[in-house]
Image: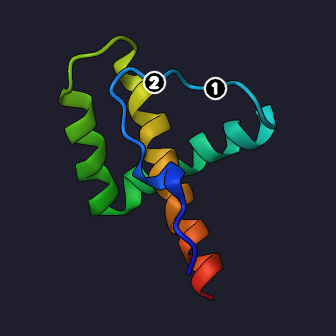
């Protein structure tokens, strides 16, 4: 299996890129909101990220949770 170098990247000050489909981004954030309400693992992740000091905490944590959800979806698609 190929190694994806982007998965090994970590940064505390990385900006959210606005490239890509804005409607898809909106619906992924909405999906993350629903997942936070229904799945305890994602709710705990959301609460952990909310405690971190940063600007725009609420929006930032939704984006992090949406990214975690996308990783799950991508993993399911790749592994069948």
Residue sitting farthest toward the bottom = 80
Residue 63 horizontal/vertical position (percent): 49, 36
Q: Which mark is residue 14?
A: 2
Write the residue at 78% across / 36% down: 20
Which quarter of the picture shows residue 16?
top right
Quick one: label 2, few (<14), some, or many (20+) residues within 10 Å? Answer: few
Residues under labels 2 and 1: Cα distance? 9 Å
Q: Is residue 70 left or right of residue 19?
A: left
Q: Position of residue 34 (x, y in %)?
A: 50, 52
The residue positioned 36% from the left and 31% from the top of the image is 11
22 displayed left or right of 56: right
- Element at label 1: loop
Which percent across, then down, holds residue 44?
Answer: 23, 51
Q: How many marks?
A: 2
What kind of element bears circle 2? Answer: loop
Describe the colour scheme in one phrase: rainbow
How busy is the neighbourhood of tag 1: few (under 14 within 10 Å), some, or many (20 plus)?
few
The percent coordinates of residue 37 (x first, y second) are 39, 52
**x 63%, y 88%: residue:** 80
> For the point 65% across and 77% down, which residue is it?
77
Identify the residue under disc 1.
17
Residue 20 drawn above or below residue 60 = below
16 is higher (above) or lower (below) than 39: above
């Amino acid at each position: 299996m190929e190694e994806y170098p982007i998965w090994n990247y970590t940064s505390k000050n990385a900006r959210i890129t606005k490239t890509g489909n804005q409607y898809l981004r909106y619906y992924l954030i909405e999906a993350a909101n629903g997942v936070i309400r229904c799945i305890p693992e994602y709710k705990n992740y959301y609460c952990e990220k909310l405690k971190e000091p940063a600007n725009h905490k609420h929006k930032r944590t939704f984006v992090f949770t949406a990214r975690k959800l996308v990783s799950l979806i991508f993993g399911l698609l790749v592994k069948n």
